[in-house]
Image (tube, rainbow, N blue to C red):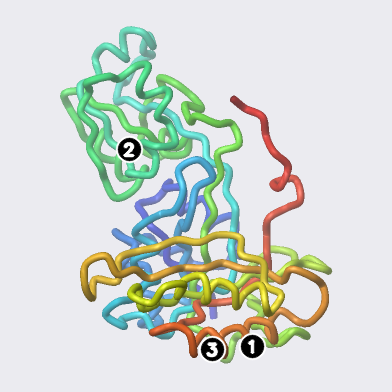
Amino acid sequence: MPRAAAYLGPVASFSHQAAKEYSDPSTDLVPKHSFTDVFSAVQSSEVDYGVVPFENSSNGSVIQSLDLLADRQRLYSDIKVCDEHYLTVHHCLLVKNEEEVDPAKGLRNIKKLYTHPQAWGQCESYLSSHFKGIERQDVSSTSKAAQIVSEDESRSSAAIASSLAASIYGLKTLAYSIEDRGDNTTRFFIIQKPSEDVTNNENGEHQETHTKSQQPQNARWKSLISFTIDHGIPGALADGLTVFKKHGLNLTSIDTRPSRRVPWHYIFFVECQVLNSVGRHGESVDSALGELKTLTQECRHLGTWKDRMGGEMFKETRNY
């Protein structure tokens, strides 16, 4: 039976491109209107897995994904992060016009811009140079922006979206690669409910069988853990973070979101990997979680997966 994967639509969004690259060709790709809809489709088993953006190399974390992983209402308690996928993101400025447009004239005609909130920060230099004072409208995805502009009969709006979106929605491209950095990359999480389709590998972590990605021979492993602390205890956060070092886990990122229990109380998201080759990642995470539970108010393991970041990504790119 063909597998199904949900992504933030409509067609031609960067989430769609990531899902297409990540998935086996036989997988049915199902567009959803929002991040919440993607999570709900996975939790209800409407689809086998979901593809959601988690962070961008230029503009940081995707807040919607963090909030859904926080799962304050316990709506997605079965969902785990099981893999990741990196997508190089190039933004284009798209307008509606049946004829070729002179770029200079086309820019002057634009009175309103549409795109996903993440894209503004990724293209800030270009936008500051060409669109000071022009209205910016947030929409659910870059492809939704392209769809809106394709339906604008006034031809006074523009979308920041992909070249694929231009092709799908019949738009003209006024400018290519308007992102601030040429190495602009978004990391997507693959979310899934662990099931009988998942097999255990030699390290005890679950290994997915639905993708066309090749499993590296000696890959690093990553885990995502969330926890809350009593902010009134001096050193509570430091004590919690020290646990990771003690158990040989290297912290690679820390994010926070409001817990919404009381003002100024936070959920901490910690991503980690094995610091040394000594010991197995699964055992290190389990032992760290055991100790962390004694030092925190609440602690959750949100998933373990193979690190897909290539060695080249660790090299500093001097693009400034």
The tag on residue 195 is 3
* Rendered view: 73 above or below 33: below
Tag shown at residue 146: 2
The count of marks equals 3
For the point 71% across and 79% down, which residue is it? 281
Q: As shown in the figure, which amino acid type bears the numbered disc 1?
A: Ser
- Give how far across and how far down residue 245 sits, in percent: 66, 72
Q: Where is residue 156 in the image (x, y as percent from the top left)?
A: 21, 22
Of circles 3 and 1, the one toward us is 1
| Precedes in sequence: disc 3 or disc 1 | 3
- Give the Cα separation between the discs numbered 2 and 3: 37 Å
Position of residue 87 relative to residue 34, above or below, is above
Judge whether residue 40 can be spotted in this image: no
Mark 1 element type: helix
**Residue pictured at 78% horizontal, 65% vertical:** 216
Q: Nearer the viewer, residue 203 or 140?
A: 203
Tell whether label 3 touches label 2 (CB within 8 Å): no
Q: Closer to the N terminus: mark 2 or mark 3?
A: 2
Local packing at callout 2 (Cα closer than 10 Å; few below 14, some 14-19, many 20+) is: many
Give yes or no for contact between labels 2 and 1 (Cβ–Cβ under 8 Å). Answer: no
> Is 132 situated above or below 64?
above
Q: Is residue 128 left or right of residue 148?
A: right
* Mark 3: amino acid: Ser
Query: Eyeballing the image, is 228 above or below 13?
Result: below
Q: Name the residue under label 1.
A: 287
Judging depth in this view, the residue of 73 and 147 nearest the camera is 73
- State the quadrant of the C terminus: top right
Spatial CA span between label 2 and label 1: 48 Å
Element at label 3: loop
The x, y position of residue 178, in whole percent, is: 47, 26
